[in-house]
Amino acid sequence: MSKEKIIVITGAKGLLGKEFVNHCRSKGFRVIEADVKTETDLDNDQYQLDITNEESVETCIKAIVAKHGRIDGWVNNAYPRTADWGMPDADLPFESWRKNVDMHLNGYYLCCNKIIKQMKLQGFGSIVNLASIYGVQAPDFSIYEGTQMGNAIIYSAIKGGIVNLTRYLASANGQFGIRVNTVSPGGIFDNQNPSFVANYNKKVPLKRMGLPKDIAPSIAFLLSDDAAYITGHNLMVDGGWTIV
Ligand SMILES: NC(=O)c1ccc[n+]([C@@H]2O[C@H](COP(=O)([O-])OP(=O)(O)OC[C@H]3O[C@@H](n4cnc5c(N)ncnc54)[C@H](O)[C@@H]3O)[C@@H](O)[C@H]2O)c1
C-alpha cells in the first residue's frame, strides 16, 4: 500500500474547495474531487456526489475504497442551499428553513456517519467539517448597512450544529483512531459590495477579508499526521474576527 493519503473533498468545485484541492495535492495527498457539479471518473479523481442522498454517499465511499483500498481523510465542504436561504428571519419560509437544515446539516451528518463506518473498519481516519465564524458568534448587522447584503439566520443554526456535532463525533470515535475537527473560516473576499468589504475590514484585527489560500493550509494540517493529537477542535481561521 502506498503511503500517499487518499483524501475526499466534498464541494470541491466551489470557491474554497478548488483551493483545498490544489493545496492538498501540493502537499502530496491524492485528492478525489467530490461534487454534484462533476462527472464520476475515478481515474481522474472525480466523483459526482450528492451529500444529501444516502445512496450517493454510500456508493461514493464504496467506489473509492474499491479503487484505493481506504480513505484516509474526508472534508465536508459542500454548500447546498435553497435560492432563498439568505432571506431575513421574518421572511424565510419555514419550508426553506427545513430544506436547508436537511441539505446542509443533515448532509454533513450523513457523510460523517457513513465515512466513520469505513474508518472504523480501517482503524484510522481524519474528518474535517467546514463551519464558520457564524457557528460561534452572532452577526453584527451594521456591516451590511447601505448594501443589499444580509446574514442568513439558517446559517448560524446549521454551522453551530456542525461545530458541536464535530465534538460529539470526536469524543465517540477517538477510541477507533478517528479524528474529527472543524475549520471555521471568516468571511472570504469574493468581490462583495465595497462598502461591506470596508466595514468588514475595519472590524477584523488583520484588517482584511480572508482568501481561499488563507484557509487551505488548516485543512491540510488537520488531515495530516502532524495533527495526530488534535481532535474535536474548532480551528478559527478568521484574521482574529472572533477575538474582539
Ligand atoms: N465563502 C465564505 O465566505 C465562507 C466562509 C465561511 C465558511 N464557508 C463554508 O465553506 C464551505 C464552502 O463554501 P464556498 O464558499 O466554497 O461555497 P461554494 O458555493 O463556492 O461551493 C460549494 C460547492 O458545493 C457543491 N455542492 C452543493 N450542493 C452539493 C451537494 N448536495 N452535494 C455535493 N456537492 C454540493 C457546489 O456544486 C459547489 O461546488 C461551506 O461549508 C461554507 O459554509 C464559506
Image: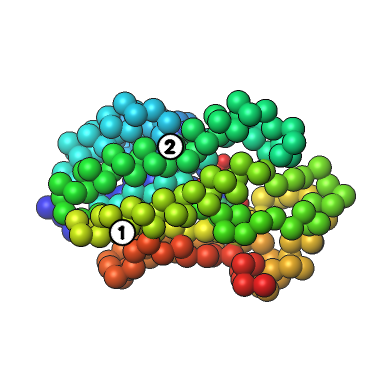
Residue 29 seen: no
> Image point 66% across, 44% down: which residue?
153
In terms of sequence position, does the residue under pointer 2 or pointer 1 come before the other?
A: 2
Q: Where is residue 4 in the image (x, y as percent from the top left)?
A: 23, 56
Q: Estimate how packed mark 2 is, as few (under 14), some (14 to 19) or many (20 or more) residues with alpha carbons within 10 Å.
A: many
Relative vertical location of residue 103 with respect to residue 127 in this rendering, above or below:
above
> Image point 39% across, 41% down: which residue?
109
> Going by the picture, which residue comes out furthest to the right?
146
What's the amino acid at mark 2?
Gly
Residue 114 seen: yes
Q: Taking 170 as reference, is 4 left or right?
A: left
Relative vertical location of residue 215 with respect to residue 147 in this rendering, above or below:
below
Disc 2/disc 1 C-alpha distance (Å): 20 Å
Q: Taking 62 as reference, is 181 left or right?
A: right
Q: Taking 64 as reference, is 80 left or right?
A: right
Q: What element carries label 1?
A: helix
> Going by the picture, which residue comes out furthest to the left?
1
Relative vertical location of residue 84 with respect to residue 239 in this rendering, above or below:
above
Foreground mark, 2 or 1, reads: 1
Q: Quadrant of the C terminus?
A: bottom right
Label disc, if present, on residue 107 of the rendered structure: 2
Label disc, if present, on residue 171 of the rendered structure: 1
Q: Position of residue 130 (x, y in %)?
A: 47, 52
